[in-house]
Each structure stands twice: as structure tokens, then as C-alpha cells.
Image: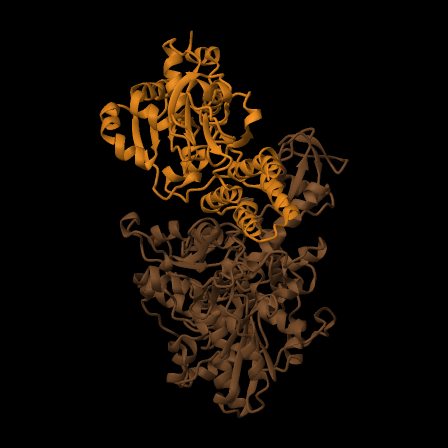
Chain colours: A orange, B brown
């Protein structure tokens, strides 16, 4: 069975958080290459190890424990596409920790480490921003289309997958993929950490299995501490989404204004500044939110505008925690009071 | 190209799949607002005010960046579209509003126009950039951070169009700011050892800025002040390309030819005399043609480089001082005519030169810098006292409530008013070259060194059938090259249309005898001081207008301009003054 069929059979999806079918991405790059003239069939493979989403630590964990498998997955991709070169786009602090080990593993390969610049921030993990970083341009998303699969690094078709995705590719190729994924659990819970478990666990089951289910009133943010969706304790019978993280908040311990302010601060700092709704909009959301009397109508309009018109996914994701918090948790606070 | 069928607001439209929704909407009479979009640049889609709703899509889409797809159903007028469009304009307004109460560009402010059209509350959000820096580049151009809306057109203009790379984006998010590279801070170890970069004052940032954050350093206030000074003789002179662009400022069609209205407007503004720089252009052509032939004869310092464009001169002085000897020492048309005004004309009129104030109306921001060059002084006196742009003149006309479109055309003042068709095309890329060639060929055929010396062999004059049109140097191409045979001599020429195209020519200078360079795209008609918007399509109209003036002119070669030849003969007898009026020198700049 060829590699694409194996990936398809395993049902691999992108583990960066978007759950995009891996086979589709690989096929898109292969097709883009085939569409080029024979002399211009250059392409690249990038392993996204930026892991800029707070509360997600699984890529670092995988690189620490299974780097050989990740690199194997990249090599499979490079062979499949006859790529020029591969890059591990590596989180700055992971590089500090793992550089020696990775360098040894990469000896005599087509793969090199590209250290994610220290100032690249959250947006530095967005796939077209990665292309800009490697090309030495301003680190911010590019206009799409064209997508990286057709015009990526230096205009060549480029395959960008997450660390965990390449890990899974390696397993699937060796027929070892067992429908597992990595979860990161943090927050007000006793057993914080990264877990490798079945990939279809509900949030509730995951918290129970890891002995983290709180005994107090709480809410959880799923899929990233910045851009994840916020759910109350009655909404946990759904699978863990996004990059597979859960953060538990005690409802009594966490002041609602502070929680929202944290998100706003995070996204003000991390907005690249390219588009008006994100650059200006988040700044104004914060301004409105810090006023004694909050203009909720304008606040909500700005949120809707942000998800409706921002240049890249960051703008949209910035609205998720706030909107879901207001919908799922805020009414509980009011009830309590 | 594929034909597709789409619907906009339920109207069925057949269009090309290569077209964006914005283009299709525009072609069908539906105007979508835009700020960051400029046809000269690739789509950036960062202002997000041109959004539309496409059936089946989760988010709104920017019409500037989304291509038409078969079966697309687009709405431009839903509540959702209106909410986002208005909010984004309001957000942008809060970045820009700082100077609103006193801003002169409010007469044609794109943001105010949008606010009016969509009934937008411009002060919905508080002014955010009040404390931003204003960066001034010599006395020519400035970038006012308090008005910038982060569209990045100035960066496109400076870095991609002109390839000067003087402007940079510093910081990110709400802190991002357009700054000159000299302001760039950061860890030294992170910076590549960059080549030194400096502004050439071309003003392409200004003419591409939708909100007047990048703009000329305004001098119209000084001109207003001096116009009230009754002890002075106030003289205006206007450049070849003004006459075909200024009408646009008053809603007239692109490329309308209006020299007579410019003269009348300037007189109504209070100028005592109005001269046409086209006269100066004929002087420049004659002196330049002479110098060209001299250089070719001696074979030294070739290729000869034109020097009419002050941004190009600054480029050479800063980036390639080794080529200073190649620049023609001939002054530019604005300097030639101003020099004659303050000597020749002053003598005729019996006016003390120091009492004359010359105000140039130029399509150019770099001309402001040129006017201040101390090496141009004549008897301690600068020939040009003030330079205002086409836009500044238009503002003065509007401010004084002069109805420009209804003005009765008038002729410029004598005796510096005659001009040839060759002068008119100075405003076009290739125009200086073509004008010089017309006269150079004449000189070669009649075996003269100078237009001032009468033709000795009358037979030669009879036989002289020098060409008028050199079409090889015309057109919008970035680089135009030709081998021109003139009186048995072969001349290798090149025309660089826009400084962004200079690199390949600088690499093979040895292949040429004569090179014209204009820093702005398509020449002065695309200059940094020209009306906004200036786009490739608009520049084309202005170019066509200049060539029309040339084609209709009674005389088409500079040396046929008797008044100019007479002025040259006058200066010929003046010894040192001749050098002061006709020639200049350059210096290396760091």
C-alpha cells in the first residue's frame, strides 16, 4: 500500500488544531508539483514546531520523547514529494533544550532546524507567517490564496504539518498508528501534564481518566488557553477539539473580568497589525471592556466584525474564548450572584 | 481566462474568472469602498472595508482580493456588510483623525468622503495616534505618523516600486509604525549589515498615500505670505506636466490640457507675472544637446546621464557618486527659466533681481529640495524661492474659491513664453531624450557645435532634414533602449522609466552613450506632487495629452524657439554669468 493510502486509511488529521485531513494536504502539494514544468518542480517540507498557543505543550513533549519518529515522518514526506529540503521550525525554548539531540538525529539528512525567532510570537506559528520567517520577511500571515501547498516557501509548493502529524505519519507508515493523540491538561487541577490517550475521548472522560475532574464549580477552555472554546461543566460530553488541550478554571477563584482581560491582553500583544479589525478592533475591545460602564452592543459588534472580517484566523480565534465565555459561563456567574 | 456567471445583489453578471469581485462590481456600476487598494500595487487587503457577503461562506470576504467564481452569489448591502464596513472605517478613522480640524486635504479626503457616503461617526473611537512622530525628509516629503492608517502603500511605493527601501515598518500590532530605516532600532546582532540608504525625495509614498499621512512638506503657506508682500515682484512658473493633470483636482477628465487656465488661476491668486517652464525646457534641451555632442566628440565621461530629475540626481550623489562626472552639468528647466527671470528678464524690466520672488509649481516633491541647493545661486541669490506641488496649487485655487473649470485661458507672460513641442514632452518618460535628440541631430547635420552660432554653410541647412519623432524612447516600458543613427554617427541610448528599473542599466553602463532617467513611473506626469489618485491608467492619459500638445505645436524642436535662442545669445555674452545660469555641479552625499 502506498503512503497516501496508508495515511488515508489511518484517517490522519492535522494536529496543529485545524483537523484538516492530512491526505488532502499532501495530495494538494503533490498536485501543485505535478502541474509545474519538469524543470521547476521544487518543493519544501516544514514541520511546524512553533507551539505558540499557551496551554499546549504536546509538541515539545513529542519532540523530547519521540523526535526520531517525527523526523522519520518528515523524511517520508520529503521522499514522497522529492522535496529539496525540510525545516523543523522550532520554538525558541524547545531549541535550547533539544538542539543537540535533534542536530545529532538530523545528521546527513535534508532537514535542518530553523529556530522560530524569539519575537515571532503567537502569529509566528501561522503557516504562511512561518514562510515569511524562513524567508526573512516580516513575520505575519500572507494573503490567501495562494495557499502554501501551491505557493509556499520562495513560491514553491510547501507541505507544512505539525509535529504530532509527522509523528502520526511515521506510525501510520509502519502500521503502528493506534488512533491515539496527545492531550495537554493544565489549570486548577492536580495532575497537569501531557497524556497520550485514545483520540475520541470526551472532555469529561479525559478529566476523569487523568484524575483531574474538579470537585468544585469550574469551567474549562478547550483547544488552547488563548483561542480555545470555553465550556461550563454541563457541556463536557463532547470530544476535545483543536490542539487537544484543556485548561480548568475554578469559577470562584477566577474573577471574570480578569479572565477576559487576560485574553484581550494576549491578543493585543499578538496581533500582527496587518488588518484594521484585528489591530484596531482588539485594542478598542479592551478599551470598552475597561470602562466602568461597558457598551456591550458595541463590544459584541466589534467581536462579530473581528471574526467576520479579519485577515487571518487569529482575528477569528480571538473572539472564540470571549464569545463562548459570555454565552456559557457568564450566565452562571450571574445566577450565582 | 474563463467566463463565469455570478450574482451581485441579485443582478446576474457574466465576467472573467480573473477579475476580482471589486472589479466586476465597479464595471457594473456598484462602487465598493476601498482605502488600501491601489492599482499600482499587488492587493494587500488590510483595510477590510470592501467586504461583501458571499452565500455559503462563513465569513465576509474582501472584494479586492476575492476572484469571481462561477455561481457566486454576492451581496454588498446586507446589514452584516454595512456593520463591518462602517466599523472598520470608524476604527481606521480613529487612527487618522488627529489633524482633521486643520487639515488642508479635507477638500479631497477619501476618508471624509466615505464617512459622508455611509453616514459614519468619525469620532466613535478616540484618537489613537496623537503622539506619533512626524518624520521629515529634507524639505521635500514627510511621513506623519499621527495620520497613518497602516495601509502600507508608502512601503510598497518606496520598496517595491522605487526599490529605494528607505521606509520600514517598525513594531507590530497597534505599535507598528512606518519609519525611515535610519530610525530602525533593535539588537545590532540581529541586523544584517545593511547598505546605507537615503531618501531621494521622489514622493511616490505621498502620491500613493490614501490619507495624506505621507505628503509633501507644504510650502503654500509661505507662498500665501509672500503674495501679500507688496514690495516684491512675485513670479510664478509652472512645469510642463502640470497643465495636463491639474484639471483632475477639479473633477475634470484625466489628461485635460489646460495651460491657459493655470495661467489665469495663478494671476487671480495674485502673482504679478506667470511664466511657462516649457521655455526653460527648450533652453535645457539646447544646452544639453550641445553638451552631449561635446562629450561624444571627446569620448569622455560617457554615457552622459540626464539631470533634470532631482530625485535621480540625489540618487547618483548618494548611491553612485562615482558617476557624478557622467551627469550632464546642464541645469534643469525650472532653474533655467528662473535664472533667466532673475537676470535677462530683470534687466529688460529694470527690476532689482533680489526683489523678484520666483514660485515654481511642480509635479514633484524633489524639486523642493533642488530649489534649495546652494550651488545654484546666481550672484548670491537662489533662482527659485519656493516650490509648491500640483496638489498645493489646487488647494490654493480651491481655498480662494476660484472656479477653475470656468476660467478663461490666458497666455503666459512675455518674453519667456514661447516654447516648442519638444518642451511639452519633458513631462513624459523619454521626453528629455527625444527633445535632446531632435536638436542634437540638427546640430550634427548642420555641423554646428552650438545653436547660438549661425549656420555657416547655408546648403547644409537646406539639406538638414532632422527627425522630429523618436518613438523608440516613448511608452510605458521600464527600460527603453535604441541605437539611433544621426548624420552617420551611431548613438546608443537608454531611457529608464522609474528609478525602480535602474539596476540593470547601472550594471551595463558601457553599452550606452546617453541615458535618460526619471525617478517617477512614466516621468513627471506620474510625479510625487501630482493629483491623487495617480495610477497607471491615469498616467497614460496624461502622457497622451503631452504628446498631443507636441504634435499640435507649430514648432517642435527646441532650437526653433527664437525667444529661447535669443536669451541664450544674450547669456553667451555675459561671461561668468553664463555658467551661473546654465550649468551646475554636484556633490557626493553621505
Camera sees residue B137: yes
| As drawn, A106 above or below B391 | above
Number of marks present in the image shown: 0
Say which of A104 and B584 sits in front: A104
Name the spot of residue B550 as percent of width and height, x first: 60, 64
Residue A321: quarter of image: top right
* Residue A193 falls in image quadrant: top left
Identify the residue shown where x is 42% and y is 62%. B200
Vertically, is A80 above or below B203? above
- Residue B394 x, y percent position in the rendering: 63, 69
Considering every residue shown, the one lying at the far top of the view is A1
Residue A45 can be seen, yes or no? no
Q: Is residue B85 left or right of residue A121?
A: right
| Rendered residue at 51%/25% (across/down) | A241
Along the viewing direction, whichever of A76 and B229 lies nearer the viewer: A76
Observer-nearest of B7 and A317: A317
Query: The C terminus of chain A appears in which quarter of the rendering?
Result: top right
Tell me: B4 left or right of B564.
Answer: right
In front: B479, or B400? Answer: B400
Amino acid at each position: 500500500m502506498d503512503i497516501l493510502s496508508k495515511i488515508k486509511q489511518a484517517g490522519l488529521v492535522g494536529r496543529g488544531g485545524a483537523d484538516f485531513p492530512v491526505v488532502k494536504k499532501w495530495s494538494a502539494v503533490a498536485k501543485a508539483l505535478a502541474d509545474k514544468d519538469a524543470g521547476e518542480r521544487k518543493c519544501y517540507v516544514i514541520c511546524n514546531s512553533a507551539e505558540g498557543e499557551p496551554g499546549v505543550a504536546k509538541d515539545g513533549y513529542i519532540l523530547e520523547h519521540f523526535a526520531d519518529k517525527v523526523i522519520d515522518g518528515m523524511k517520508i514526506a520529503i521522499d514522497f514529494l522529492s522535496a529539496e529540503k525540510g525545516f523543523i521550525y522550532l520554538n525558541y525554548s524547545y531549541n535550547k533544550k533539544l538542539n543537540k539531540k535533534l542536530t545529532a538525529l538530523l545528521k546527513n539528512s535534508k532537514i535542518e532546524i530553523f529556530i522560530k525567532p524569539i519575537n515571532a510570537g503567537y502569529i509566528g506559528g501561522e503557516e504562511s507567517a512561518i514562510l515569511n520567517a524562513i524567508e526573512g520577511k516580516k513575520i505575519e500571515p500572507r494573503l490567501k490564496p495562494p495557499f502554501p501547498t501551491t505557493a509556499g516557501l520562495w513560491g514553491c509548493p510547501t507541505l507544512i504539518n505539525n509535529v504530532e502529524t509527522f509523528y502520526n505519519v511515521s506510525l501510520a507508515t509502519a502500521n503502528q498508528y493506534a488512533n491515539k493523540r496527545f492531550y495537554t491538561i493544565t489549570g486548577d487541577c492536580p495532575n497537569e501534564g501531557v497524556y497520550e490517550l485514545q483520540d475520541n475521548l470526551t472532555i469529561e472522560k479525559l478529566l476523569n481518566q487523568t484524575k483531574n475532574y474538579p470537585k468544585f464549580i469550574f469551567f474549562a477552555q478547550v483547544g488552547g488557553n488563548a483561542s480555545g472554546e470555553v465550556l461550563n461543566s454541563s457541556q463536557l460530553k463532547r470530544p476535545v477539539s483543536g490542539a487537544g488541550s484543556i485548561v480548568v478554571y475554578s469559577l470562584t477563584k477566577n474573577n471574570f473580568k480578569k479572565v477576559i482581560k487576560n485574553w484581550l491582553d494576549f491578543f493585543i500583544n499578538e496581533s500582527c497589525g496587518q488588518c484594521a479589525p484585528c489591530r484596531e478592533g482588539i485594542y478598542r475591545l479592551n478599551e470598552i471592556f475597561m470602562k466602568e460602564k461597558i457598551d456591550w452592543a458595541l463590544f459584541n459588534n466589534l467581536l462579530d466584525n473581528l471574526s467576520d472580517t479579519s485577515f487571518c484566523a487569529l482575528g477569528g480565534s480571538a473572539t472564540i474564548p470571549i464569545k463562548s465565555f459570555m454565552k456559557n459561563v457568564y450566565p452562571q456567574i450571574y445566577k450565582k450572584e | 481566462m474563463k467566463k463565469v456567471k455570478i450574482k451581485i445583489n441579485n443582478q446576474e453578471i457574466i465576467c472573467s474568472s480573473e477579475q476580482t469581485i471589486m472589479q466586476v462590481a465597479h464595471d457594473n456600476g456598484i462602487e465598493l469602498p476601498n482605502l488600501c487598494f491601489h492599482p499600482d500595487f499587488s492587493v494587500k487587503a488590510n483595510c477590510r472595508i470592501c467586504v461583501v457577503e458571499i452565500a455559503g461562506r462563513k465569513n465576509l470576504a474582501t472584494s479586492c482580493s476575492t476572484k469571481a467564481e462561477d455561481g457566486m452569489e454576492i451581496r454588498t448591502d446586507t446589514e452584516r456588510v454595512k456593520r463591518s464596513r462602517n466599523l472598520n472605517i470608524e476604527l481606521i478613522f480613529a487612527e487618522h483623525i488627529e489633524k482633521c480640524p486643520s487639515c488642508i486635504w479635507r477638500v479631497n479626503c477619501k476618508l471624509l468622503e466615505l464617512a459622508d457616503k455611509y453616514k459614519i461617526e468619525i469620532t466613535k473611537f478616540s484618537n489613537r495616534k496623537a503622539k506619533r512622530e512626524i518624520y521629515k525628509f529634507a524639505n521635500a516629503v514627510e511621513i506623519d505618523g499621527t495620520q497613518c492608517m497602516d495601509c502600507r502603500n508608502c512601503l510598497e511605493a518606496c520598496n517595491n516600486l522605487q526599490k529605494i527601501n528607505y521606509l520600514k515598518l517598525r513594531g507590530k500590532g497597534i505599535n507598528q509604525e512606518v519609519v525611515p530605516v535610519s530610525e530602525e532600532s533593535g539588537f545590532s546582532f540581529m541586523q544584517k549589515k545593511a547598505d546605507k540608504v537615503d531618501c531621494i525625495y521622489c514622493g511616490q509614498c505621498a502620491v500613493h498615500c490614501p490619507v495624506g499621512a505621507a505628503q509633501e512638506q507644504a510650502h503654500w503657506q509661505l507662498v500665501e505670505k509672500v503674495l501679500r508682500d507688496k514690495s516684491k515682484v512675485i513670479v510664478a512658473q509652472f512645469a510642463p506636466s502640470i497643465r495636463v493633470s491639474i484639471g483632475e483636482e477639479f473633477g475634470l477628465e484625466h489628461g485635460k490640457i489646460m495651460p491657459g487656465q493655470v495661467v489665469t488661476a495663478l494671476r487671480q491668486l495674485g502673482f504679478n507675472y506667470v511664466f511657462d517652464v516649457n521655455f526653460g525646457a527648450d533652453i535645457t534641451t539646447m544646452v544639453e544637446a550641445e553638451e552631449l555632442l561635446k562629450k561624444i566628440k571627446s569620448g569622455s565621461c560617457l554615457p552622459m546621464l540626464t539631470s533634470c530629475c532631482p530625485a535621480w540626481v540625489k540618487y547618483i550623489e548618494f548611491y553612485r557618486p562615482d558617476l557624478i562626472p557622467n551627469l550632464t552639468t546642464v541645469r534643469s528647466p525650472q532653474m533655467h527659466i528662473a535664472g533667466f527671470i532673475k537676470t535677462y528678464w530683470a534687466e529688460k524690466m529694470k527690476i532689482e533681481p533680489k526683489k523678484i520672488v520666483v514660485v515654481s509649481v511642480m509635479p514633484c516633491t524633489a524639486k523642493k529640495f533642488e530649489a534649495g541647493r546652494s550651488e545654484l545661486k546666481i550672484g548670491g541669490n537662489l533662482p527659485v524661492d519656493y516650490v509648491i506641488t500640483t496638489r498645493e496649487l489646487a488647494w490654493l485655487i480651491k481655498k480662494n474659491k476660484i472656479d477653475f473649470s470656468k476660467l478663461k485661458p490666458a497666455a503666459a507672460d512675455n518674453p519667456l513664453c514661447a516654447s516648442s513641442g519638444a518642451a511639452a514632452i519633458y513631462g513624459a518618460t523619454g521626453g528629455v531624450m527625444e527633445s535632446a535628440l531632435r536638436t542634437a541631430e540638427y546640430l550634427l547635420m548642420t555641423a554646428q557645435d552650438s545653436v547660438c552660432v549661425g549656420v555657416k554653410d547655408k546648403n547644409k541647412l537646406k539639406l538638414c532634414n532632422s527627425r522630429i519623432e523618436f518613438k523608440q524612447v516613448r511608452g510605458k516600458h521600464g527600460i527603453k533602449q535604441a541605437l539611433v543613427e544621426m548624420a552617420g554617427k551611431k548613438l546608443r541610448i537608454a531611457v529608464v522609466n522609474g528609478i525602480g528599473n535602474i539596476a540593470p542599466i547601472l550594471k551595463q553602463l558601457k553599452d550606452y552613450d546617453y541615458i535618460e532617467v526619471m525617478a517617477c513611473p512614466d516621468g513627471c506626469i506620474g510625479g510625487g506632487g501630482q493629483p491623487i489618485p495617480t495610477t497607471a491608467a491615469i498616467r497614460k492619459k496624461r502622457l497622451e495629452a503631452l504628446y498631443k500638445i507636441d504634435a499640435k505645436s507649430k514648432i517642435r524642436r527646441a532650437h526653433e524657439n527664437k525667444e529661447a535662442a535669443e536669451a541664450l545669445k544674450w547669456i553667451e555674452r555675459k561671461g561668468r554669468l553664463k555658467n551661473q545660469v546654465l550649468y551646475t555641479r554636484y556633490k557626493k552625499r553621505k
